[in-house]
Amino acid sequence: MDTLDRILGEWERERPDLDVSALAVIGRLSRYADLVQARLDAVFAEHGLQSWEFDVLSALRRAGSPYELTPGELDRALLITSGTTTHRVQRLESRGFVTRRRDEDDRRVVRVRLTDAGRAAHEVAHEAHAENETRILSGLSEGEREELLSGLTALGRVLGDTVETERA
Amino acid sequence: MDTLDRILGEWERERPDLDVSALAVIGRLSRYADLVQARLDAVFAEHGLQSWEFDVLSALRRAGSPYELTPGELDRALLITSGTTTHRVQRLESRGFVTRRRDEDDRRVVRVRLTDAGRAAHEVAHEAHAENETRILSGLSEGEREELLSGLTALGRVLGDTVETERA
DNA sequence: GTCTGATATCTTGATATCAAGATTTTTGGA
DNA sequence: TCCAAAAATCTTGATATCAAGATATCAGAC
């Protein structure tokens, strides 16, 4: 008996005509995403980072040397609006984790680059974060974990989460 | 090839020593929860509702006649803080979807009750919302859907999402 | 009966986010 | 060359949220 079972039971009592089988899946998806996020936030907080700060640092770190992206690339990588990116970059710049400079060839463009301090801060937090993720899933059996991954991957497909592969 | 595959590939290139198998699961969980939420929001918007407004109306509707909960019960049902509940209830009250009144027996307590207008607004949106959820999952095969549900349920267990059943 | 701690709700101040629009720069005709 | 449209970024104003604390009420010990 979990939270969604209780909710489904309440709908069964109130509206027995409704089909709640989709809610059973989607309700769990959102609820557990929230619960997982809370656990991730706790570890980021131990390292003095907000979750969104870690996300930006990670995107830059993943980009590879010289650890640089434009605000527009950050918008798209992090699924956020341009105003949010401006705000995030300002905050990280004030903490000394990134620098901003105009691109000389196309002066509309800005280059956001990870500083050594930003990379170091990310490194430590990333280590703890990866352990945290592993710990959260460690209670799942191998089979359960495969079911979850395979089910989520199928969901990604129907949600249209696909990326073109490079042409030869 | 999906977004998470791309991210995992970038980590493989940058930090081949890291174990990213947990990220493959948790990254998809949060990303797809976001993508699903965006689709749900779109349908709520067609009915003039914010997602959080629908959540409050649903919690009251599920409570059964007389469709009444206290702010504290809403806090716990919706996993939000008390300040957020105050704000939400005020907004719904101003739209005429709920009423607030002091409990006469315990004057610390407030009773938030769904109005007929609130129930009607919820009814229509709920219908469309349920169809939307069903539509989102309709691209999954029966087996994929079972894998997803079963994997999520297992995840709920390890996240401690359990509710006591009533004693006899 | 009278405190003291617990409980329920609301308030305050800060902040992350978004939508919409403003600004600057580049590009591609005519 | 010049202009209109496109592109990249930033600004503005609104709002949902939270953490922490304030306020009001109740319950239990004595």
Image (cartoon, coloured by chain):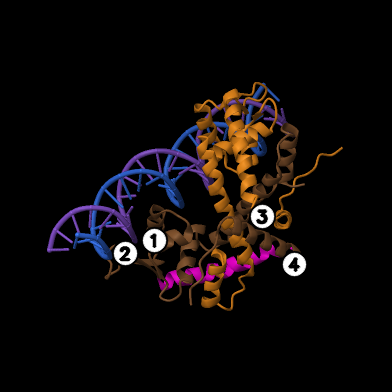
Chain colours: A orange, B brown, C purple, D blue
The disc placed on residue B109 is 2
Q: Find the distance from the CA under tag 4 to the CA under tag 2.
A: 46 Å
Q: Quadrant of the N terminus of chain A?
A: bottom right
Q: Is label 4 on the same chain as label 3?
A: no
Local SS, label 4: helix
Query: What type is the residue that disc 1 sits on?
Result: Gly
Q: Is residue A102 above or below residue A58?
A: above
Q: Determine whether, in the image, residue B27 is placed left or right of residue B12.
A: left
Q: Which mark is residue B142?
A: 4
Left or right of B101? Residue A138 is right
> What label does residue B72 carry, if any?
1
Gap in angstroms between the C-alphas marked 2 and 3: 41 Å
For mark 4, does the 10 Å Cα neighbourhood hold few (<14), some (14 to 19), or many (20 or more) residues? few
What residue is at 71 percent from the left and 40 percent from the top? B19
Q: Which mark is residue A140?
A: 3
Tell if the residue under mark 4 belongs to the same chain as the one under mark 2: yes
**Callout 3 amino acid:** Leu
Residue farthest toward the right in the current orientation of the protein: A168
Disc 2 chain ID: B
A143 shown above or below D4: below
Mark found first going from the N terminus, 1 or 2: 1
Say whether marks 2 and 3 touch (CB < 8 Å): no
| Residue B97 forms part of the magenta stretch | no
- In the shown orientation, is residue B37 left or right of residue A153? left
Q: Front-most of C14 and B73?
A: B73
Q: Residue at x 50, y 61 (%)?
A: B49
- Kindly report the distance in space between the C-alpha atoms of the residues bearing marks 1 and 4: 39 Å
Give the Cα distance between marks 1 and 2. Answer: 9 Å
Magenta residues, as a range? B115-141
User: What amino acid is found at the position of numbered circle 4 in the picture?
Assistant: Glu
